[in-house]
Amino acid sequence: MISTVLVANRGEIACRVFRTCRELGIATVAVYSDADADALHVREADAAVRLPGAAPSETYLRGDLIVAAALAAGADAVHPGYGFLSENAGFARAVTEAGLRWIGPPPEAVEAMASKTRAKELLGIAPLDPAAVTAAELPVLVKAAAGGGGRGMRIVRELSELEGELKAASAEAESAFGDGEVFVEPYVEDGRHVEVQILADAHGTVWALGTRDCSLQRRHQKVIEEAPAPGLPAALVEELYGASVAAAKAVGYVGAGTVEFLVADGRAHFLEMNTRLQVEHPVTEAVHGVDLVALQLAVAEGRTLPPEPPAARGHAVEARLYAEDPAAGWAPQTGRLHAFAVPGGGGVRTDPGPASVPGVRVDTGYASGDTVPVHYDAMLAKVVAHAPTRAEAVRKLAGVLERAVIHGPATNRDLLVASLRHEEFRDEGRLDTGFYDRNLDALTRPGEGGAAYAAVAAALAEACRNAGRFGGGWRNVRSRDETRTYEDGTEVRYRPTRDGGFEVLAPEGVRAVSAAPDRVRLDVAGVVRDFAVAAYGDGTVHVGRHRLTPRPRFTDPRERTLPGSLLAPMPGTVVRLADGLAVGDRVEAGQPLLWLEAMKMEHRVTAPASGTLTALHAAPGRQVEVGALLAVVQTEDVPAEDVPTAKASAEDVPADDVPTEGVPTEAQEDPTA
């Protein structure tokens, strides 16, 4: 029997494994980097071992340090989570050679399937020869052989770009997984991403534990997943089950795994097999009433599975809540989570806040007061809703996300809510991986009404705070109306009244019922609404689900920068420069100049205009803060004042599917995962 488990991972997945271990009476050990010294997974564990450093290559990807940590802490088993080293056969062998139990498939099965090229060869599927690809075969997909989550993945639509994308994908894969092997395969446009959960014991039983649809993706990383995959013909489901069980038996698979397919035109195309737990495993757990981590532990102890898996009941939908800005190229965000509470239960502990909702589960690696670091994936939580029907589960999940309290960095919460309520998502027959390509602009367009009223509440609450600090609000002689403008362009005008209240002048049709520093009541067209307001030292104001940033009343002259300056869009590390790039070079608009890595994503920084590179302050390995000057491009044919001063126009390359909790995206997890 297993007595103590070390989880070779971080964040949400470590917390999730710890939860099951506690329920089974198994002691837990965490490992942590310096950046994670006070992380929730460290606080949740019975014991913790430091891995000196912050970068994954120094910490969570160091199998030797993790094995040593397990031995030092007295653990007798290691659970890899997902991402990082979860699909590293060498690590699995090192664990078993140290006398520890590996909670995962045999290293030989990991080797056979963790490399996508070898997995395809095993199933008789040959990748394309990069040197022989023709224009007629485009588009093609360059893909890392190891890992997942979108890391080391590029879509190539122009033959001239293939060589450069192969090099870039290889460099990213090497950084994320320690393996730079990449391959090329045909790219199927706008298919459905469907997967089958499998679970196998050491006695020959293999379960096909239902299907999942993971078609809503950005940058090849999953955003919303559900089980079972809706609208699939029964014959196709049986075909997927058969292929998945056959793949598992072909490599002597033991434990939990996932076989992934792209479904298009009624046909299933094998993508890969992930030899680990998936980020989206909770939807399968909800529908089949199982604990996959508990089953992983049972299988690792040599127990036998029942002949058939539990039957499916109802429908489950999961949304990945990220600290990112979808309207700004999905740019990951960092910073302090001032308040974080999601009205769910049955998952990792969340802060007291909104009342729990039956059938909702929240798995997270964060609590109020925690800081989202720059080194890892930006996923804050997975929120799962289970109900008798798909429509009920979708409605429940959207409502829970809408009521969540998330004060801190920008998140994709509004995008998730809008996606769940979009007609294409509601119509299960229209699911495909092109959803965000078609709809992102509409989904991220600023909404009308709600945000404007939230701005009114923020402005009046600020006026109350200022009145408390400086005394008084109304004056006999009023020189002018008060105005507050926010970064989204919303302008609020108001004036104090003799009775201590406020008259709202703009936007029109709003009447202030009452106002206090933390709560404002507004009457809009006869309907009274209550707004909770929270302001923080970083300048942000949170009103309900709205995050507002007031524009400064006066411009700080120190913030002026040279025209053509390229500023870092986020904290990160410069991973490489364009070949031969040097001051004095002529560059073209859109030309890649350098690459930043932040939160498991690689960001390609391009020239804002054609001209001459007059300054270059970036160097490989240099860590930069948001807004740091990276380079300056001076044009000869455009007046200096017309040259953009911009935050690096970063073309994001998926980091990983995993919550980065793990590895860089699959590196953390395979979005594709």
Image (tube, rainbow, N blue to C red):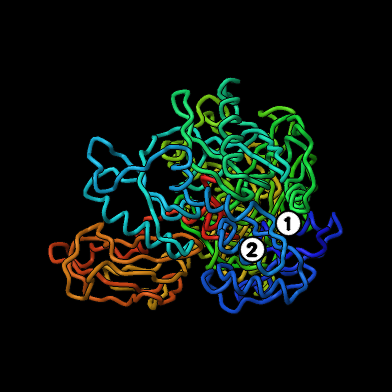
Residue shown at 63% from the left, 53% from the top: 106
Q: Quadrant of residue 247?
A: top right
**Residue nearer the viewer, 322 or 48:** 48
Q: What residue occupies the far right of the structure in this picture?
A: 25
Q: Secondary structure at mark 1?
A: helix
> Residue 673's x, y, as percent?
55, 46
Which image quarter is the N terminus in?
A: bottom right
Q: Quadrant of residue 62?
A: bottom right
> Residue 152's x, y, as percent?
41, 55
Residue shown at 25% from the left, 51% from the top: 161
Q: Which residue is mark 1?
A: 17
Q: Amino acid at mark 2?
A: Asn
Work out whether residue 328 can be spotted: no
Q: Are marks 1 and 2 in contact (CB under 8 Å)?
A: yes
**Residue nearer the viewer, 412 or 562:** 412
The answer for how far apart the CA atoms under marks 1 and 2 are is 10 Å
Above/below status of 145 relative to 96: above
Judged left or right of residue 30, residue 176 is left
Above/below status of 248 relative to 231: below
Give me the disc on residue 9. Answer: 2
Judged left or right of residue 213, residue 392 is right
**Residue nearer the viewer, 517 or 97:** 97
Q: Secondary structure at mark 2?
A: loop
